[in-house]
Image (cartoon, grey):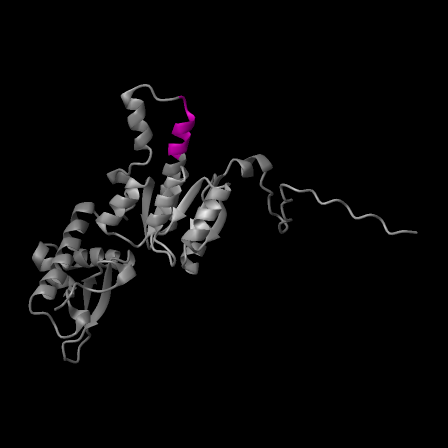
Amino acid sequence: MPPPAPRPVRVGRCAAPRGRAGSVPVPASESENRIRVLIVEDEPAAAEALALHVGRVPGYGVAGHVGTGADALRRVVAGGVDLVLLDIYLPDMSGLEVLRRLRAAGMTVDVIATTRARDLSVVQAAVSFGVTQYLVKPFTSAAVRQKLDRHAAYRASLAAPLPVAQGEIDNLFGALRETAESAGLPKGISRESLQSVVASLRTALEHDARGAHPEDEDEVGARSAAEIARELGMSRVTTRRYLEYLVDAGLARRQARYGGGTGRPELEYRYLPDPHHNRPPDLR
């Protein structure tokens, strides 16, 4: 008796894998309506974190992950991508070049830049190529969710009838605009005071780099919380809170200052102009 013929394999949508006991399958309609996100990131840890954060936002799903600009271009052109989370620094080409080539090819896919680059010229170039939002590393799950929620609101506005009045057009662009209340700053951190502390650290770095600076390069621009507090007229406790926030955000580095005594070393903080290329200004 001949063996039974194998069952034909259906080409197209793959069957969803069986989950563990107690898991709830995602309805096909819900999966199809998700915004498909391509993560372009060459750092495995950052890519994994982004995928985890995106997966927690309702209405979004990870369509794939690539680590080079060339792979990003091929993946977007192939289709099936609604939003690109694009790092500016890639091993084969910059994210700006990826954006330029996408737009030159007529690809209008939405793009959110996810990078450590905080240079104003980089931000301006990214915006000119159609970056809708900018997510600065290191980012939190809440920050990623906020950006995606705004992107979803923007897409929902586009799906509505065409705007016919100035107010409706303003609302369309306003869906992506960040307000002061939703800037993502934690409780107890005000934008104005934060800007003052950052300006103080930047001034210290520039002063030491251009004038008589310490022999140890790591001490260039380094200031303690007490020194910053005296300059700004703030309490030392409050100043330290802002400095620690900058450290957590990757905008400053904390290090110990040894005065030669036997007591505990004092903590000092140093502004990081660009963590991706972590070097101070030219000290010549």
Q: Which one is nearer the viewer's eye here, 243 or 235?
A: 243
* Residue 149 located left or right of residue 225: right
Above or below 157: residue 50? below
Residue 13 in sight here: yes
* Left or right, 1 with reference to 49: right
Q: Residue at x 12, y 72 (%)?
A: 214
Does residue 55 show up?
Answer: no
Q: Residue lying at the far front in this picture: please name it.
A: 104
State the image coordinates of residue 185 (x, y, percent, origin top left): 27, 47
Q: Magenta residues?
A: 153-161
Which quarter of the picture shows residue 227?
bottom left
Residue at (55, 37) in percent of width and height: 32
Look at the picture and state if 45 lies above or below 121.
below
Residue 161, given in percent of the width and then of the height, sits at 40, 21
**Position of residue 234 measured from the top left corner of the image (x, y, whole percent):** 12, 54
- The location of residue 30, given as percent across then percent down, is 55, 36
Name which quarter of the figure residue 221 lies in: bottom left
Q: Nearer the viewer, residue 196 or 281?
A: 281
Q: Residue furthest top?
A: 164
- Quarter of the image that includes the C terminus: bottom left
* Dominant secondary structure, magenta: helix
> Residue 251 is drawn in which quadrant?
bottom left
Residue drawn at (6%, 66%) of the image: 211
Residue ID at (40%, 57%): 46
Is residue 155 in the magenta section? Answer: yes
User: How many labels, in total?
Assistant: 0
Q: Is residue 283 above or below residue 105?
A: below
Q: Nearer the viewer, residue 241 or 123?
A: 123
